[in-house]
Amino acid sequence: MKRHLTVAALIAALLVPSSSASAVVHPSEDTPTLRMRVSVLKEMQHKERQRRRQHHLKVHAIRTYERKTVEVGVAPTGTFSGSLPRGYSSTLLKYHSTVLAAPAMDAYFEACQRVGHYIGGSGYRSHAAQVSLYSQKPGLAAPPGTSYHEVGLALDVFNVSAEEQAALFATGWRRVRADEPWHYSWKVMG
Ligand SMILES: [Zn+2]
């Protein structure tokens, strides 16, 4: 006799004391079949535990994000002249030490979640900081008023692994400057 039980019912049956095992396994079944059934049930129970654990981890990661992400409260200055993507918000968020504009931060955090750790990197830079950097490294930094760092949509991250790069690409980050392999921008060409 073949029984078709749901996974939940099989797991529930496995959880009952062994004296009630006949409730699941037909008494007339031979021992090898019974052993096989029990191992299948155990495997299912194991998978269920793993699924719950993964779900818990995901919930934990989101809570950590909510806790560690703080509004910086510094709006980019009005000197920026480039075009901004749809959904751009000047709200700046900070995750660990990386500061980005709200929609770019969401994408960045998703990339961190994909790899399971903080990727790192330097994002937002004030207009004053861009002026200062440009005076020190004119060959490397973009002229003030033209850098996407000034609006929190660019990220400088060094020594990214292939996995981290794939996660950044998958969440809308692009490498648009061949001469700056560390520079990523989010849905903008600069
Ligand atoms: Zn950069």
Image (spheres, rainbow, N blue to C red):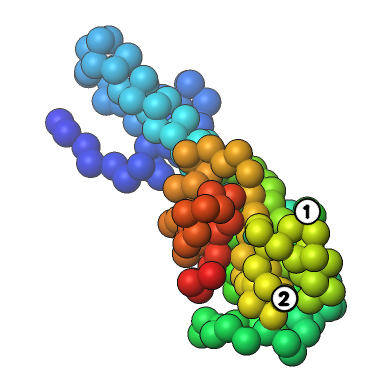
Quadrant of res 185: bottom right
Q: Which residue is mark 2?
A: 144
Q: Give the Cα separation between the discs numbered 2 and 1.
A: 26 Å
Q: Residue furthest bottom?
A: 78
Observer-nearest of 24 and 56: 56
Q: Residue furthest top?
A: 31
- Mark 2 touches mark 1? (CB < 8 Å): no
Report the residue at 62% width, 65% height from top: 154
Q: What is the secondary structure assignment of the residue under circle 2? A: loop
- x and y, in percent, of residue 147 in the image: 65, 72
The answer to whether residue 60 of the structure is visible from this angle is: no
Image height of 139 relative to 182, above or below:
below
Q: What is the secondary structure assignment of the residue under circle 1? A: loop
Q: Which residue is mark 1?
A: 96
Question: Regarding ligand 1, which quadrant of the image does it lie in?
Answer: bottom right
Image height of 167 relative to 145, above or below:
above
